[in-house]
Image (tube, rainbow, N blue to C red):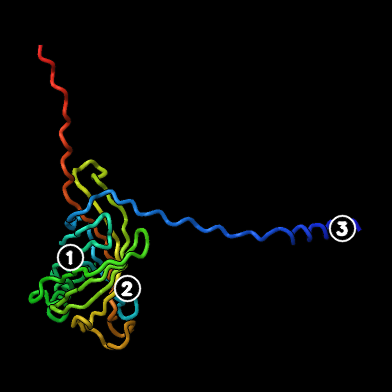
Amino acid sequence: MKYWTIAAAAFALAACTPPATETEAPPPAPAVVNVPSGEYPVDPHHTTIELRVKHFGLSMYQFRMNAVSGTLNFNAEDPTQSSINVTVQTNSLDTPYGGDRDFDAELQNSEWLDAATHPTAEFTSTSVESTGPTTARVTGDLTIKGVTRPITLDVTYNASHATHPMGFPLQLIGFSAHGTINRLDYGIGANTLVPSSPEATDGVATQVELVIEAEFSRPAPAAPPVNTPAEPVN
């Protein structure tokens, strides 16, 4: 009898206890931007543009473009008002192929990129849409082989430095970006045995992923001179 009395009291207490309310998660902290607004050239030594494409359904074959230049017009107060223009030299295509063929030159030729006629590919942003404290969608025009099509990149702001961490007089800002294009849109149709299938197993897929790691840098302004009081004149 004592057991049932205790159980009943516990049940009554539980019934009278209001349900626990879920606490709302705090809003994400805003991005910390340590550099001012202005123009920031691409740092070509710390910027990579990698491309990935399904190779006969076997793997995501990867290669990169090595010669990149351009400028970021960064708005520190309102990053959605920023813009970017990037140029890539198409004859800088670099594959990991180590056989007896000059595979890089083959992909640079007229059947693929036609680097002799179209030596550059270009991207110019047209809008920036914020998607989070450190993320955005950047839409722009991508031109390859003289054909221009819109593309949207998912971009993440990584960090910025008012002065290089190793003490160099540079201001730095860095981003990661990802996007996808259909190479057929740009007249690159080689080895597409089943054009209707982006994941074709009997050819090279039409969908090409872009994986971008970009750094921008510019000289930091010189520190103002320190005014020291003049020696008193005796």
Left or right, residue 164 beside residue 27: left
Between 207 and 54, the one lying in front of the other is 207
Q: CA distance from mark 1 to mark 3?
A: 77 Å
Determine which quarter of the picture holds residue 63. Answer: bottom left
Residue farthest to the top, as pictured: 234
Left or right, residue 73 beside residue 20: left
Between 166 and 6, the one lying in front of the other is 6
Visible in this render: residue 97? Answer: no
- Within 10 Å of disc 2 (Cα), the crowding (few <14, some 14-19, many 20+) is some
Q: Secondary structure at mark 1?
A: strand
Which residue is denoted by mark 3 in the rendering?
5
Determine which quarter of the picture holds residue 198. Answer: bottom left
Marks 1,2: beta carbons within 8 A:
no
Residue 227 spot, x, y in % from top left = 16, 29
In primary-sequence order, the first of circles 2 and 3 is 3
Q: Amino acid at mark 2?
A: Met
Circle nearer the viewer, 1 or 3: 3
Left or right, residue 151 beside residue 234: right
Q: Secondary structure at mark 2?
A: strand
User: What residue is drawn where x is 16% and y is 56%?
Assistant: 41
Which residue is denoted by mark 1 in the rendering?
85
Which residue is denoted by mark 2 in the rendering?
60
Q: Which mark is residue 31?
A: none
User: What residue is drawn where x is 10% and y is 75%?
Assistant: 118
